[in-house]
Image: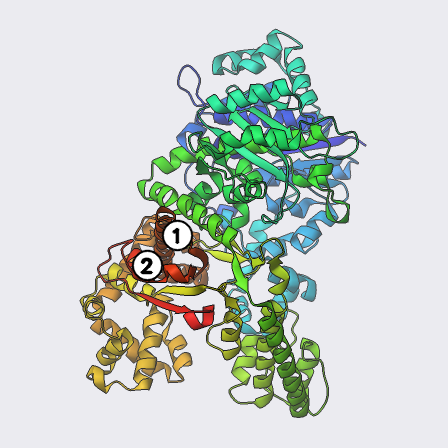
Amino acid sequence: MPTLLLVDGSSYLYRAFHALPDLRNQSGDPTGALYGMISMLRRLTSDIDAEYRACIFDASGPTFRDTLYSEYKSHRPPMPEDLAKQIEPIHAVVRALGWPLLMESGVEADDVIATLAKQAAAAGFSVVVSTGDKDLAQLVTPQVTLVNTMSNERLDVAGVEAKFGVTPERITDYLALVGDTADNIPGVPKVGPKTAAKWIQTYGDLDGVIAQAADIKGVVGENLRSHLDFLPLGRTLTTVKTDVSLPVAITDLLAKPEDQNILRDVFRHNGFKTWLKAIDEPGAGTKTAAKTEAEAPLALLPDDGAHRVHYETILDEAALNRWLEKIQTAERVALDTETTSLDEQQARLVGISFAVAPGEAAYLPLAHDGPDTPAQLPFADTLARLKPWLEDSTPRKILQHAKYDQHVFANHGIRLSGIVDDTLLAAYVLEAGQVSPGALELGTLARRHLGLPTIPYEAICGKGANQIGFNQVAVADASAYAAEDADITLRIAERLLPRLACEPGLESTYRNLELPTAQVLFTMEQNGVLIDNQQLADQSHALGERMLALETEAHTLAGQSFNLNSPKQLAEILFTQQGLPVKKKTASGTPSTDEEVLSELALDFPLPRVLLEYRSIAKLKNTYCDKLPQRINPATGRVHTHYSQTTAVTGRLASSDPNLQNIPVRTPEGRRIRAAFIARPGHSIFSADYSQIELRIMAHLSADNGLLSAFAQGEDIHRATAAEVFGVMPLEVDDNQRRAAKAINFGLIYGMSAFGLAKQLGIERGAAQTYIDRYFDRYPGVARYMEETRQSAHQHGYVETVFGRRLWLPDLKAGQQGRRQGAERAAINAPMQGTAADLIKLAMIAVQDWLTREQLQSLLIMQVHDELVLEVPDHERARVSEALGPLMTNVAKLKVPLVVDIGIGPNWDDAH
């Protein structure tokens, strides 16, 4: 069966332009996209054996979709000038590489690809389409396959269904529901990939979803019904044409040999010396490639005009001595570890990789023990030789997620120093809000910022039950993978750090906040926290008994026994047998029994109230009482959580394995769990908490005179707000008025509407709106800040914290009104949350710096939102009590005073 290979040329050239550095020839003309196109097409032809092929580009001018929908792709900026200059040379070189080239006016490249794919499949061809465009998943059949060279992903029919949850023929229905931001096609607000796939699975296709729209409950159902008129057009816009009239037949697309004369001129003119040498000295390029392959069989990074890829495996003393000299004399070194585990407290070294220049890297295997493993240098002796360099703060070291590697070295008695850059944190500071946290992984960064594919971990270790440990990987394969990691880390640093240098606020956030915070977090994670195991066991027993009592009460109220953890049985009892009102339905159309529904029903009915309490108790028992003891490290006797700096776009830290930030403080059961976090004998727990920090930041940002005055005079801010809103003297404010003012103060920070306030306070919507209007009348600076922030966010696409952290809000330009409004609420709240996150980080840095400088034995052991928790020996209690408050309040000067509440006790609950 002949094979036709089709390339989405327009996708390729944009990918090449944005991925590669600003390469230029001797005349100063841009060449990066040209170089990238040549590299990608040559790699593709070597990977896929196809007798027939074509490279398809978008033609200039409007297409039929612009006529159907005036907003189609209207948000896209014009083509960058440096890319536009390379279009004609790219077209010429594509032809010189032996690729037939097609462009058709009035349609897009996707339509031409679809037409060719359909014709070729009908003629008995196997078709491979190289693209990163999810729209073309609709083309996949047993004869048509998609390949994404950036992610090494290959999609057949089963692959499409696994990835999207729908079959290829339903992809256009799926896209109509979720929308396509790249093409400015709005989907149904609040409908994401999972919901869209579920609807299509349930109702068959888009027409079925439309027909059953009245039965879909909740907010998404309302959004669907308000969007029904656009859905057919959305499907039409995402459906590719398969009947474009083309000037060629499939048999005209036979691959041609490269035109060496044209390519020689192109390579010489643009300074592509390696490729030029391969033409002028046949065999030279082959020898270079063979040498690289022998040293690192899986290496995927191509040589280019600036970087020759050369990876080495350090297996003997001579190689070790040579690389010790390299890393000791290099201006900076990228460093990476390969280990036995992702658990940073347990991981042991398998090997170490270094990169001293782009393309020049090495791997030092230390503990491989798989079959046919060559002799390795002695583990202990080799680490001892490396230890002085690793612990020296002078050599400049670059890592990706350095904190993990610090823990790994610490497990071997080495304190890694000299970390000057962390590419994970640099990318996070630059791109928070623009990409998901998962998009900060090294391989994804390489594809996004360098346009380079990397070796997936699964390619050398396997997947699932068949996955092997890194110590079992063949040394040659491990060397390719590990050396590439160090090389990529160095290249990413070279790409991102100049961008940070051009943004003083972002560079300050990176260098003065995130990098030092990472060092404090490393220390906190090493310190861990002591847990009273017996107390948790006792609490688990008591909670278990309470669960049994609640289960009995629920059975009595239901009039029968049932499984409290079964949504199906619960729905049957609540809505069928007891006739309670259905508040919303699941995606499959069954009545929902989630927490929101039960909370609403619990206001009027006893059984939902009991169920809510049961779920709350069960979560405390299972998540904390039973699992926390399992997380105690046997080597230290303490629990060591992991803090992530890159999970939340606002800069807030996230705790995991175990999560220590979600232990409830408002319930007696939650407080008893906190009481199990204890100090060692002769020590106390200190809790230092910023008071009303986000409200103080609001006063600072808005510069509202009323708020500034209230905080300056140390007033109860909620009582002061109530006095203003209700027109009474502060002493006359009653509890209900203060409660309402508190709801307003915090609600406005999070963008609460009059409807939300009314629901929270149990009042009419009109009364809630009156409260809000009075608030803004009394605090006009707040209203002004909110409006100015909205306008600035729309103008720039982001907001900033007081300290310069940038928070991107891409949904400000979303076609869906709900998403835009959500982004506007986030624009108002994010500077406050982000500034609060920055303040607690500055406080952590200041406190840990003081503890280190004064050589104290007190330990910083936890950070929970706006609170720092320390374990303090009794003989240091007075010093820490005196210093802690000023250390935290003096990290920044706002327009209102910062206040820190400090508590001391034998456990966290007593101290908080």
Q: Secondary structure at mark 2?
A: helix
Residue 597: x, y in percent? Answer: 56, 78
Q: Are marks 2 and 1 in contact (CB under 8 Å)?
A: yes
- In the rendered structure, the answer to whether residue 99 lies left or right of residue 714 reads right
Compare residues 209 and 425 and report the one nearer the observer: 425
Determine the residue positioned at 73% across, 26% down: 375
Between 234 and 853, the one nearer to me in the picture: 853
Residue at disc 1, secondary structure: loop
Say above or below: 493 vs 260.
Answer: below
The image shows residue 840, relative to residue 778, as above or below, that is above
Residue type marked 1: Leu
**In the rendering, which numbered label is found on residue 856?**
1
> Which x, y percent locates residue 194?
62, 60
Of the two numbered discs 2 and 1 on the same chain, state the one appearing first in sequence.
Answer: 1
Q: Which residue is mark 2?
A: 879
Q: Where is residue 877, by image quadrant?
A: bottom left
Residue 902 in which image quadrant: bottom left
Q: Residue furthest top?
A: 281
Q: Residues within 10 Å of mark 2 (few under 14, many from 20)?
A: few
Q: Position of residue 45 (x, y in %)?
A: 68, 26
Q: Using residue 865 as the reference point, say whether residue 356 is left or right of it.
A: right
- Tell me which amino acid carries mark 2: Arg
Residue 569 occupies which quadrant of the picture? bottom right
In three-dimensional space, the C-alpha distance between marks 2 and 1, rounded to whole angstroms, equals 10 Å
